[in-house]
Amino acid sequence: MADIVANRKKRTLTNAQIFETGKLPPQAPELEQAVLGALLLEKDAINIVAEVLKPDSFYDPKHKNIYEAILNLWQNGSAVDILTVSHELKKKGNIEMSGGAYYVTSLTNRVASAANIEYHSRIIAQKFLQRELIRISGEIGTEAYEDGTDAFELLDSAERKLFEVSQGNIKKDYRNISSVMQEAINEIDELRGKEGGLTGIPSGFSKLDRVTSGFQKSDLIIIAARPGMGKTAFVLSVARNACLSNTETPRAVAIFSLEMSSKQLANRMISAEAEIESDKLKKGILADHEWQQLNSKIAKLSEAPIFIDDTPAISVFELRAKCRRLKQQNNIQMIIIDYLQLMRGDDSNNKNGNREQEVSYISRSLKALAKELDVPVLALAQLSRQSEKRGGGGSASPGTGTGRPILSDLRESGSIEQDADMVMFIYRPQYYKLTEWDDGTPCADEAEIMVAKHRNGELHDVRLRFIGKYTKFADKTDFDNYAIPDYNDNNGNNGTITVSSSINWDSDVDDEGPITFNGDAPF
């Protein structure tokens, strides 16, 4: 009993030392009055302040109400002055809570102009962040003393709240539909001039980007296939293209590889970029010209902001923590996880050892992570053997049991399909010893990206070229669509035009590769 009393005394003393109760929260009421007065004097001042301050940034409730009225008028395109703000407050029934019409009028006497309004606004914002840090620290301290608190959940919650503060993105309970719609209209207007309707992060595959409009922020994209279909090769191609398609400012990409080591991934990317067979790289048997080719082609890729983490069996908690730090420090624009079923859920959420529930928790967490960081999350996933049972193995013929996957083939949890904004399958008929597509065209060295679920767009299948010896995917060229006849001119020269299957990734458009002649050139 004596120990319990002693611990309570110690706990009270520690709280007093940490939070220093009795002090006034950080505030700057004079500056709040000056900013509001400047907003009432200068019609364009709100354009500066709106990017820095929110209504909750004001400590005094009167000032919060007045600023909300100013924002409402501005968002509706109405004039902002003493009369319109007073009328808006009366309409909302907040005029008395805001000090009355006289107090609103007196604010203009606090400042002569809006010359220093941005500087004053940033001081108010800093005071608000200080108050938020005090509030969050108090909540963490209170929860930490509770015996039933899970330490890892508390740590994750604390990190999330601090991340929100550091990003200046403190979550609110609700938002007015008018402000949300205005943001959406402004974004649509900005996207109007973009080529090809590309609004998200490009995959680098032209036809696929036309279907998806790029990978959208806050979306969870599941890329699923049977083993050996080229899931890792596909996302490495996507990572490279997404990172380097914007030459002025490369987009940072984070790759979490639970299956392969970072060195193995690097070797794959080198093989794809330099177009040198992976077997040669593995053995180190390269000719002099191949060394030159390797050094010249990977120079750009070696400087790319691609971050690889090969922690095995990473947990959701660890993943979130690392992604938040990467977002803060390197402003990552895309997250790739290879692959989902190798992840661990938090131990506290899987006490019964049910793997299906654990995978459901992981998929929900990945969707939440995509929304929190406002980036697309691409998660690879394995398919069950059901697709194998529907055909393949060399005995199947095109159109009758070809092993094509469907959504129900996603392994271990139906919630993966439910949580995903987009589900894509990778399908290569050649894997099943098939020689033709369903339409009768040759399928050698080709793959199909099947968009099986698309929450915000159409469903479509896109065919790509799969270059196995370089472990990469590339756009099919226009020359794949028709045969080129033999050439025979009037002088007796003849030769066959052949098209290289090598794709130059440095090109912004489909590159058909060099054209060579077996005979003399006709021109």
Image (cartoon, rainbow, N blue to C red):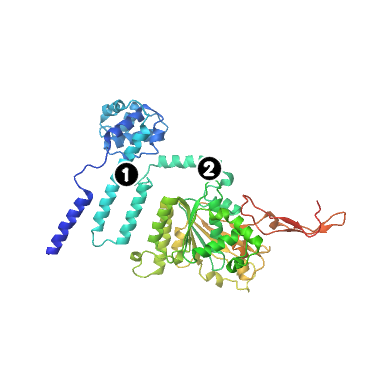
Label 1–label 2 contact, CB within 8 A: no
At label 1, the amino acid type is: Leu
Q: Position of residue 415 (x, y in %)?
A: 44, 62
- Alpha carbon of mark 1 to alpha carbon of mark 2: how far? 33 Å
The number of discs equals 2
Quadrant in which the N terminus appears: bottom left
Identify the residue shown where x is 58% and y is 68%: 282
Residue 203 visible, this orientation: no
In the depicted structure, whether residue 194 falls above or below residue 89: below
Q: Secondary structure at mark 2?
A: helix
Horizontal side of residue 521 vs 168, given as left or right: right
In the depicted structure, whether residue 23 falls above or below residue 427: above
Comparing labels 1 and 2, the label whose residue is closer to the camera: 1
Judge by depth and name the residue closer to the eye, 267 or 57.
267
Residue bearing mark 1: 129
The picture quadrant where one finds residue 7 is bottom left
Residue bearing mark 2: 191
Identify the residue shown where x is 34% and y is 30%: 85
Packing grade of label 2 (10 A; few <14, some 14-19, many >=20) is few
Q: Position of residue 471 (x, y in %)?
A: 59, 63
Q: Position of residue 271 (x, y in %)?
A: 59, 62
Horizontal side of residue 124 vs 501, given as left or right: left
Horizontal side of residue 319 vs 109, given as left or right: right
The picture quadrant where one finds residue 54 is top left
In the depicted structure, whether residue 310 falls above or below residue 505: below
